Image (cartoon, rainbow, N blue to C red):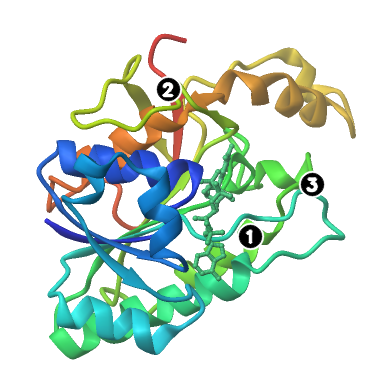
Amino acid sequence: MKILLIGATGNLGLRLVAALLTHGHIVIAYVRSPRKLELLLPSNVYSQIIVVEGDATNTALIKGTILENDCDAVVNTAGVAAMAPWNKSDLPEIFSAVLKAVQQAGSERKEPLRVWFLAGLGVLHFPGTNTMLSNYVPIFLEHRQNIRLLRALPPHSVDWSLLCPSTMTPENLEISVPTKTSGKLTACATTPPMWMDSWLKYIPFFGKVILAAMNASRYDTTLEQNAEFIASDLEDRDSRWIGVPVGIIDAKK
Ligand SMILES: NC(=O)c1ccc[n+]([C@@H]2O[C@H](COP(=O)([O-])OP(=O)(O)OC[C@H]3O[C@@H](n4cnc5c(N)ncnc54)[C@H](OP(=O)(O)O)[C@@H]3O)[C@@H](O)[C@H]2O)c1
């Protein structure tokens, strides 16, 4: 597939460049600073991609880049959610701008575009309920307004998926193609996979908070595993992750 990768200079973005190339995709990296990307990637990797300079809040430029390069899919890793509920980041503005560009480009092409966005563990539901985990542990709340935008889209206007990792750490500091990862992820739609249940959830007021906090660190994964997950899913035109938030866990856990 021909993929527009927005935020290629970031921790996940750099690993995605390598993973997408490893899976045979054509990569168009959309970044604020091509020079920064050139310094972060080995020259033999940088030479394999097309680089476009632009801001992730620029809907018109993103849409134009998708259409001019005839992209089949978009991955957005630009913007980082604020952790504390009282802080604000530019992620909501970026998310909304990219989503509009993808929707408009799909509408002009008369075929919805495939897109992967990033959120966090907190937008997944506490298993067995319709309540988001971030109701119990209220951090990274900006992801909630982003998922509301996805759910408000007209049917079949965007083939979106929303990856909801907990903390992601690097396996390797060097970026190389082909990629190496320590192992695969197990995924589940809407709730975290392999949730560790406990009677604690029946304790009034605090039980689910304690259980959610106890589970959170089990969902730590690596940047390389998440990049591999997205790159491999984009080989499948009928992905089962279209239209859902996706929880993931290291398959070895
Ligand atoms: N890392 C984690 O543990 C973790 C866990 C759960 C979810 N997430 C989510 O995963 C996503 C990626 O995380 P990450 O660790 O890769 O973040 P990161 O390393 O901080 O990368 C953020 C990227 O966003 C780009 N960016 C920011 N504002 C931009 C703008 N206006 N226009 C264009 N690019 C812009 C940055 O570009 P510059 O280089 O130009 O600054 C950078 O490439 C984030 O949305 C984050 O909330 C991360």
Q: Disc 2, disc 3: CB below 8 Å?
A: no
On screen, 184 above or below 88? above
Q: Tell me the quarter of the picture where residue 232 sits.
A: top left
Q: Which mark is residue 138?
A: 3
| Residue 39 image point, x, y percent | 41, 48
Residue found at x 48% / y 20%: 194
Secondary structure of the residue carrying tag 2 is loop
How packed mark 1 is, by other alpha carbons closer than 10 Å (few <14, some 14-19, many 20 or more), is some
Q: Tell me the quarter of the picture where residue 205 sits.
A: top right
Q: What amino acid is found at the position of numbered circle 1 in the picture?
A: Arg
Sooner in the amino-acid sequence: mark 2 or mark 3: 3
Give left or right: position of 228 versus 50: right
Residue found at x 46% / y 24%: 249
| Residue 228 image point, x, y percent | 29, 33
What is the CA distance from the residue labelled 2 to the residue labelled 3? 31 Å
On screen, 28 above or below 189? below
Q: What amino acid is found at the position of numbered circle 3 in the picture?
A: Pro
Q: Which mark is residue 172?
A: 2
Q: Which mark is residue 23?
A: none
Q: Residue furthest top?
A: 252
Residue found at x 11% / y 56%: 1
How packed mark 3 is, by other alpha carbons closer than 10 Å (few <14, some 14-19, many 20 or more), is some
What is the CA distance from the residue labelled 3 to the residue labelled 1? 11 Å
Q: Disc 3, disc 1: CB below 8 Å?
A: no
The answer to whether residue 245 shows anywhere in this view is: no
Residue found at x 37% / y 28%: 225
Secondary structure of the residue carrying tag 1 is helix
Which residue corresponds to mark 1?
Answer: 144
Q: What amino acid is found at the position of numbered circle 2 in the picture?
A: Asn
Q: Disc 2, disc 1: CB below 8 Å?
A: no
